[in-house]
C-alpha cells in the first residue's frame, strides 16, 4: 500500500471509492436474490445559481472505470471485518460491470432533468458504481461549466487555467486542467496535465524570483537569459510601475540581440488603469508586440467588468476562483432509479415522489431542436421508445454488456465539440447572471406516464 | 501510463504536479548558478469570510512527498520537448529534496500570518516543491476548518462525513474524509478512506433501494434481514410520514426476535417539525432507543439553526456543503520567500512590498500564550533567534537535510490533538459569523526588522 497516494495508486482501489451504503444495499439485494436489471439516470436536478446551462464532461473516466472496476483480496478482507457475509464477498470477488450504458458526448451543453448517462445493469452492479460516477462527473462538469463562462467573459482573449495550488488535491488538479481546456482555455500551468493530456502549458514568474535578487533589473536580466524568446516579466513586486521601466530596458537589450520580450504580468492593484498605462508606455517605447498578462482573483464576473471598463489585457490567468468554481463548487448531479425489472421479467418504470425530489420514470432519450442555422431552440425529454422527428437525439450508446462500443474522442475533438455546442447556444442563455431559461419540455407520452404513476403511487405506497 | 488515474498512480509523477513557472524559474536559477539556500514560509494571508481560525492539516502528505519527490526519464523527456536545456535536465535527473523543514503539528489551531511550514533549502529545491505543498495544505486545511465548525454546531451530537459524491475527485474524497475525521467527525461514508486510514465507516440506505421494491414495507423488511442489528431506515421516499409507520412495524417485528432497529433517516422536508413528530411517535411506541439521523444540505449554519429550534436529531450526515466547503472552497494559503543567502554566504531577510501583499521577513517562530487553564490568550510571531518566555513555541523541526526527524503521529493522535486545540480556543473565537478576532502580535524585534527593511526597499528597488 502506497501511503502517500492513499490507495489511489491504481484502478483496483476504485471499487471501494464508494459510499458504504452502496455496499450494504447491494448485500441486501444479494441476500434477497435480486439480480434483476434496473436503469438509473444521471442528471442534474436544477441549475446552480447564475448558471444557465452545464457543459458536460467526465464521461471518459466513467467508461474507463466501468471497464476495470473490481474487488481485490485486500478489499474483501476489509469488507469481511466490516461484517459482510462470505457469500456476498464471494460474489464481489467475481464482480465486473456487465451493463449497457448510453450517454451524451463530452462537450455537450445540457440542462436540468436531461439524462446525461443512462445505466442499465443488474441492480447490484448499477448501484455499486453510483458514487464514483457521480464524483467524477460532478467534478469535471462543475469545472468545465465554470471555465466556459470565464472563457466567454474573455471575449476571445486567451484564458490560461492556473489554479493548481488551490484546486482540491491531485485528481482535481488534473481534471480541472482537462475540463477547463475542453471549455476553451488555451492551456494550463499544470505540467503533469501537460504531459498526461497533451494540454499546452504556460507560466510566467513569481514574486519570489524577483525578491531573490538584490535588484529587480538583475532578476529580469537573469530570467530572460534562460528564456529569451518567451519571457513574461512580473512587474508589480515592489511598486506598481517601478518594474515596468526595467522591463522596457530589458526589452530594448533583447531587441539589440534581435530578440523580443514576450510581455509583462500584472498581479495586483487596479488592473483597468494599470493595464491602460502599461499599454501606453509599451507602445510609446515601440514595444507594441509585448503582451499584457493579468492575474489575481479573476473569474467571469471580474473579467467581464475589466473588459467592459476598457482594460488593455491580452491574456488572463484564471486561478483559484475558476479552479474551485468558488461561487458554486458543485452541481446538483444525481443518479436515480427510473426503471426496474419485475419478478416476471418485465421492465417497469419507477418514479420518486418525496418533497421537491421528483424524478422522471422510464428509459428516456433527449431530443434537441435547432433552427436553420443550427442554433439551439428547445429540448424535449421523451421515452426511449418514442421517435421524434426533426430533432437530434443526444444520448448515444457507449457500452454494451460491459464492453465499450464507443470510440473515445481525442481531447481536441472533445474541445472542438464543446466549442461548437457553446457557439450554437444563443447569447441570451449565456448571460452571467439572470440568463433566459432554455426551454426543456417533456414529450406527451412521458407526461402521461408521470401522471399515471403519480396516481398509482399515492394509492398503493 | 495508466490513463484512468491520469498519471496519479504513483508518487513519481508528483514532481510534475507543479506549475510550469516553478520549473522555468528553477532553470533560470540553474543557468545563473544560484544554488544558495533560501527560506520560504507557508502561511495564510487572511481568514476567509466567517472563519475565525484555521485547523491546520496536511503535513503528513507534505513530508511523504518531500521524502520521495524525483524526476523520471519520462518527465525529463517531456521537459526536453518543452525546451528545457540538457544541463538542467541532468540536474533534475539527480534531484532530491535536501532541506530543513519546521512546521506546526497537524491539528493545530492557527491564524493569519503565522508560519505553518518553514522550508530552508537550496532555492531550486524550495521552489520546485511549492505547488504540491500549497495544493495539499489548502485542500486539507480548508476541509478540516470547515468540518470543525460543523462539529461545533452539532453540540456533541455525531456528525458523519458523507459528501464523497460531490467532493472534487479521488484525492479530495480521501483527504476530506481524513481531515473531517481529524476535525471531530465520527466517521465517513467513504469505504476506501475506511480501509486506508482506519476511519469508522457508516451508511444508511438510498431512496432507490426503497423504490426497487413494490412496497416500502417489503424494502424495509428486506434490508433489516441483511443488517438486523444496525439498520437505519429512510422514511421519506413517498410521503413525509408514510414510511415511519412501516419502520415502527419492522422495529416491532425485530423486537419479537430480540433485535433492535437502529433508527430512521430524514432527508427532506422541515427537519425541525418532522424530527419532533418522529421522536414522539417512536417514543409513544416504546422505541426510545431508535435514533434519528438527518441529512440534506447540512452545514454549520443549518445545524445550528435546527438545534436552536429544538430539532430532535441524534446524528447528522454532512455531505456536499461540508465536503466542498461550499461557502468558501479555499483558503488564502501562500508560500513566500522570507530569507535568502547572499553571494557572501550570509542569510539576509527578505520582504515583499506590493499592494496588499506584504510579507514578514526572516526566519520566524510562533509563540502561544495561555492562561492558567490552558486557554489560548494571544500569539506572538517572533524571529527564530528570539526566545520568548512563558509561551509555547508552535513550530517544531520535522525534517533535517531531507530526512524526516519527526515521528508521524497516528490519525487518532492527531484527532485528539485537534480536539484539545479546539477546546482551548475560547468560545468567543468560535462564533459562526462575526467572531472576535484572536490577537496575533509581532515581537518588538520583528517589528523593527519590518520597519528597517521597508525603508531600505523603497530606497533601493
Image: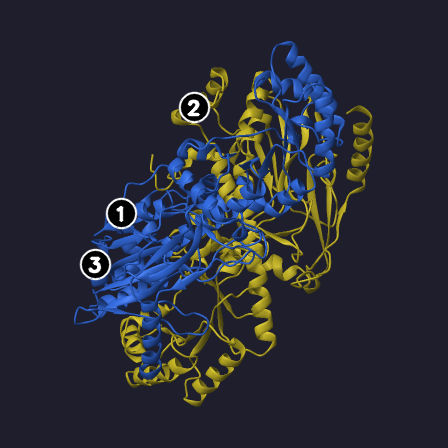
Chain colours: A blue, B yellow
Mark 3 — residue? A91
Chain label for disc 1: A
The front one of B307 and A417 is A417
User: To which quarter of the image does residue B93 belong?
Assistant: top left
Q: Residues within 10 Å of mark 3 (few under 14, many from 20)?
A: few
> Viewed as shown, does residue B452 lie left or right of B340?
right
The front one of A25 and A204 is A204
Q: Residues within 10 Å of mark 1 (few under 14, many from 20)?
A: some
Q: Do tag 1 and tag 2 residues touch (Cβ < 8 Å)?
A: no
The front one of A207 and A275 is A275
Specify whether disc 1 shares its chain with disc 3: yes
* 1 or 3: tag closer to the N-terminus: 1
User: To which quarter of the image does residue A275 belong?
Assistant: top right
Which numbered disc covers residue B76?
Answer: 2
Identify the residue shown where x is 45% and y is 56%. B166
Q: Nearer the viewer, mark 1 or mark 3?
A: 1
Which numbered disc covers residue A67?
Answer: 1
Disc 2 to disc 3, C-alpha distance: 44 Å
Secondary structure at numbered mark 2: helix
Where in the figure is residue A377, as x and y percent of width and height? 44, 54
Disc 1 to disc 3, C-alpha distance: 18 Å
Which numbered disc covers residue A425?
Answer: none
Secondary structure at numbered mark 3: helix
Where in the figure is residue B423, as x and y percent of width and height? 62, 62
- Can residue B374 be seen in the rendering of this structure? yes
> Viewed as shown, does residue B451 lie left or right of B379?
right
Chain label for disc 3: A
Identify the residue shown where x is 37% and y is 41%. B5
Chain label for disc 2: B
Disc 1 to disc 2, C-alpha distance: 31 Å
Amino acid at each position: 500500500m502506497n501511503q502517500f497516494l492513499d490507495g489511489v495508486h491504481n484502478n483496483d482501489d476504485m471499487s471501494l471509492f464508494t459510499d458504504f451504503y452502496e455496499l450494504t444495499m447491494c448485500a441486501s439485494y444479494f441476500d434477497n436474490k435480486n439480480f434483476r436489471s434496473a436503469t438509473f439516470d444521471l442528471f442534474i436536478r436544477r441549475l446552480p445559481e447564475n448558471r444557465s446551462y452545464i457543459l458536460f464532461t467526465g464521461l471518459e473516466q466513467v467508461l474507463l472505470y466501468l471497464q476495470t472496476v473490481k474487488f481485490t483480496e485486500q478489499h474483501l478482507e476489509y469488507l469481511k471485518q466490516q461484517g459482510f457475509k462470505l457469500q456476498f464477498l464471494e460474489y464481489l470477488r467475481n464482480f465486473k460491470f456487465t451493463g449497457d450504458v448510453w450517454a451524451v458526448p463530452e462537450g455537450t451543453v445540457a440542462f436540468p432533468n436531461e439524462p446525461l448517462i443512462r445505466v442499465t445493469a443488474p441492480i447490484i452492479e448499477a448501484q455499486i458504481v453510483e458514487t464514483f460516477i457521480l464524483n467524477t462527473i460532478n467534478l469535471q462538469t462543475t469545472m468545465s461549466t465554470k471555465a466556459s463562462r470565464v472563457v466567454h467573459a474573455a471575449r476571445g482573449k486567451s484564458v490560461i487555467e492556473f489554479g493548481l495550488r488551490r484546486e482540491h488535491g491531485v485528481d482535481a488538479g488534473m481534471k480541472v486542467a482537462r475540463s477547463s481546456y475542453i471549455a476553451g482555455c488555451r492551456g494550463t500551468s499544470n505540467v503533469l496535465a501537460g504531459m498526461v493530456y497533451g494540454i499546452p502549458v504556460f507560466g510566467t514568474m513569481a514574486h519570489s524570483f524577483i525578491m531573490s535578487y538584490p535588484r529587480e533589473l538583475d532578476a529580469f536580466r537573469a530570467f530572460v537569459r534562460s528564456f529569451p524568446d518567451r519571457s513574461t516579466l512580473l512587474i508589480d513586486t515592489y511598486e506598481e510601475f517601478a518594474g515596468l521601466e526595467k522591463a522596457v530596458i530589458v526589452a530594448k537589450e533583447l531587441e539589440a540581440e534581435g530578440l523580443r520580450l514576450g510581455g509583462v504580468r500584472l498581479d495586483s492593484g487596479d488592473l483597468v488603469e494599470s493595464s491602460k498605462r502599461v499599454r501606453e508606455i509599451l507602445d510609446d517605447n515601440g514595444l507594441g508586440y509585448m503582451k499584457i498578462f493579468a492575474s489575481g482573483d479573476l473569474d467571469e464576473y471580474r473579467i467581464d467588468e475589466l473588459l467592459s471598463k476598457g482594460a488593455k489585457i491580452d491574456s488572463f490567468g484564471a486561478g483559484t476562483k475558476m479552479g474551485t468554481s468558488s461561487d458554486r463548487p458543485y452541481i446538483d448531479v444525481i443518479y436515480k432509479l427510473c426503471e426496474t425489472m419485475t419478478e416476471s421479467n418485465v421492465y417497469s418504470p419507477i418514479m420518486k415522489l418525496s418533497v421537491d425530489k421528483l424524478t422522471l420514470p422510464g428509459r428516456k432519450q433527449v431530443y434537441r431542436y435547432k433552427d436553420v442555422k443550427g442554433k439551439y431552440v428547445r429540448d424535449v425529454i421523451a421515452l426511449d421508445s418514442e421517435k421524434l422527428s426533426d430533432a437530434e437525439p443526444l444520448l448515444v450508446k457507449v457500452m454494451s454488456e460491459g464492453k465499450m462500443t464507443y470510440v473515445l474522442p481525442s481531447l481536441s475533438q472533445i474541445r472542438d465539440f464543446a466549442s461548437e455546442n457553446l457557439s450554437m447556444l444563443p447569447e441570451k442563455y449565456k448571460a452571467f447572471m439572470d440568463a433566459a431559461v432554455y426551454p426543456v419540455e417533456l414529450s406527451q407520452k412521458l407526461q402521461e406516464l408521470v401522471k399515471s404513476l403519480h396516481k398509482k403511487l399515492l394509492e398503493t405506497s
